[in-house]
Amino acid sequence: MEIPNDIELSLVKKFRQGIWSRFLKGIKDYQLIQEGDKIAVCISGGKDSMMMAVCMKRLQRYSKVPFDVEYLVMDPGYAPANRQKIIDNAAKLDIPIKIFETKIFDSVVNVKQNPCYLCARMRRGYLYKNAKELGCNKIALGHHFDDVIETILMGMLYGSQVQTMMPKIHSENFEGMQLIRPLYMVREEDIIKWSKYNGLEFIQCACRFTEEREVYEDGSSNSKRQEVKELLKRLREVSPAIDKNIFRSVENVNLQTIISYHIGDEYHHFLDDYDKGRSVRGTIAGSEE
């Protein structure tokens, strides 16, 4: 049996509580992996997806639920230095990556409206396609708990909607394929601590659009997500539990206190059954309790 390296072991020793236990909790609570799955672990080269790959590699080795993995890297047009950085880090982490190339950066570099959205959509389509060709039924992305919280707030503040980033979803365009997020319960600060502890350096977004934007000395940029990150940082100073409260808000939705909601194309409005006289607690208004 392959002997885990020190970087991998640090996940289950020094970072057991912050990373490994939360990783396992997300897998279990949301039933992300079933027996017989073949999962394409999608690696962008950043800290999140690289650490996810290490976690998945260890889980596959010791899990009581047998499953297979492929470690898939899509090159959307990286600069040679960034591509080599991914290759070097994969070797250091003992991750057997498979690289395929696209020209996504060339396709979106001149797009004026929502280039990041278009890039993300194209990336996901290519990942599904190549994963399916490898015989996989799932792709795993490296989104973490902070991404989930930020998505909730971004939807409310900039998208005028209440939604969250789901732990797993069915693909709409690739039959039989699913997307899972194994780091769903893992905090970004713990991923950063793990990276620094092991002396690891990973690439950032590395796309041309990001590189052309104004980037400040601390590494932040003028993106909407960065605005939400800064907002959360200020809110945590007042209420350390703010992240958990935001997350629980989408676990504890009372539809009788929502003006309108929809499931797919099926829309509901609170006036639809308002005359039935139900209170927000679901009881008949005026009845004895």
Image (cartoon, rainbow, N blue to C red):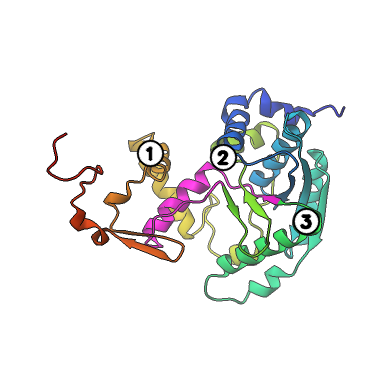
| Label 3 sits on residue | 83
Residue density around tag 3, few if under 14, some if 14–19, many if 20 or more, within 10 Å = many
Identity, as a three-letter code, of the amino acid under mark 1: Asn
The residue range painted magenta reads: 138-167
Q: Residue at x 74, y 65 (%)?
A: 77
- Between 230 and 171, the one lying in front of the other is 171
Q: Is residue 284 left or right of residue 254?
A: left
Q: Residue at x 67, y 29 (%)?
A: 11
Q: Is residue 177 magenta?
A: no
- Between 34 and 103, the one lying in front of the other is 34
| Label 1 sits on residue | 245
In x, y percent, where is residue 156?
Answer: 38, 56
Residue density around tag 2, few if under 14, some if 14–19, many if 20 or more, within 10 Å = some
Q: Earlier in the sequence, mark 1 or mark 3?
A: 3
**Quadrant into which the N terminus falls:** top right
- Disc 3 or disc 2, which is closer to the eye? 2
